[in-house]
Image: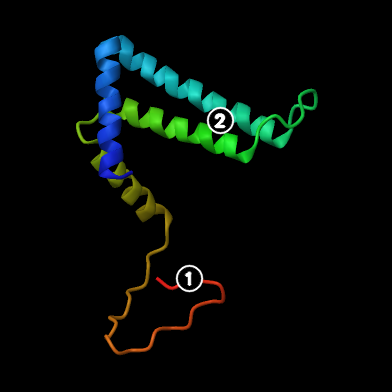
Amino acid sequence: MTPDQWATIRRLVEWLDSANGDGERETAMRLMKLAEESGEVMQAYIGATGQNPRKGLTHTPADVAAELWDVILTAAVALHRFTDDPAGALESKIREVARRSLPPQPPRAPEHPNSPRPPRPPGQARV
């Protein structure tokens, strides 16, 4: 997430704190909200796959994505209860998971300003 997005999430946390307080009960409610949002992801996925023959297709992949965004946002709000630096904690977690999950990247050779660039695959945009 970008710094602006984290700042907006911080404002949402402050808004919720002012409306609902910031005690243990509110922490539990925010974690329960995360579980509720996760259930909505599953409901949308079941609807998008037509798993329930009585209901058929009731959702789209875009609905599933929207529910996943709700989970991410709700988790980011809840994360503020457990760290003073949620952005740093997320960045650290991403690095940790990548380190243990992804193969090491080979070192890149330094580019010379006049060296030719490798050809682009067809249809790939120039960056």
Which residue is located at x 40 percent, y 27 percent?
74
Colour convention: rainbow
Which residue corresponds to the image point at 42% horizontal and 58% vertical from the top-left?
A: 102
Quarter of the C terminus within the rendering: bottom left
The picture places residue 108, in percent across and down from the top left corner, at 33, 76
The tag on residue 125 is 1
Q: Quadrant of residue 82?
A: top left
Question: Percent position (x, y) of residue 58?
Answer: 70, 29
Of marks 1 and 2, the one in the foreground: 1
Q: Describe residue 50's horizontal placement relative to residue 124 as left or right.
A: right
- Please determine whether, in this image, residue 30 is positioned above or below residue 46: above
Q: In this view, does 98 lie to the left or right of 84?
A: right
Q: Earlier in the sequence, mark 1 or mark 2?
A: 2
Q: Name the residue under label 2.
A: 41
Q: Which residue lies furthest to the right in this view?
A: 53
Please give the name of the residue rendered at 25% of the width and 29% of the height, measured from the top-left corner.
10
Q: Is residue 26 above or below residue 53?
A: above
Asked whether the beta carbons under mark 1 and mark 2 sit within 8 Å of each other, the answer is no
Q: Which amino acid does label 1 sit on?
A: Ala
Q: Residue at horizontal 29%, vertical 46%?
A: 91
Count residues near mark 1 (Cα–Cα under 10 Å), then give few for <14, some for 14-19, many for 20+: few
Q: What residue type is labelled 2?
A: Val
Under circle 1, the secondary element is loop
* Percent x, y of residue 93: 32, 44
Mark number, residue 16: none
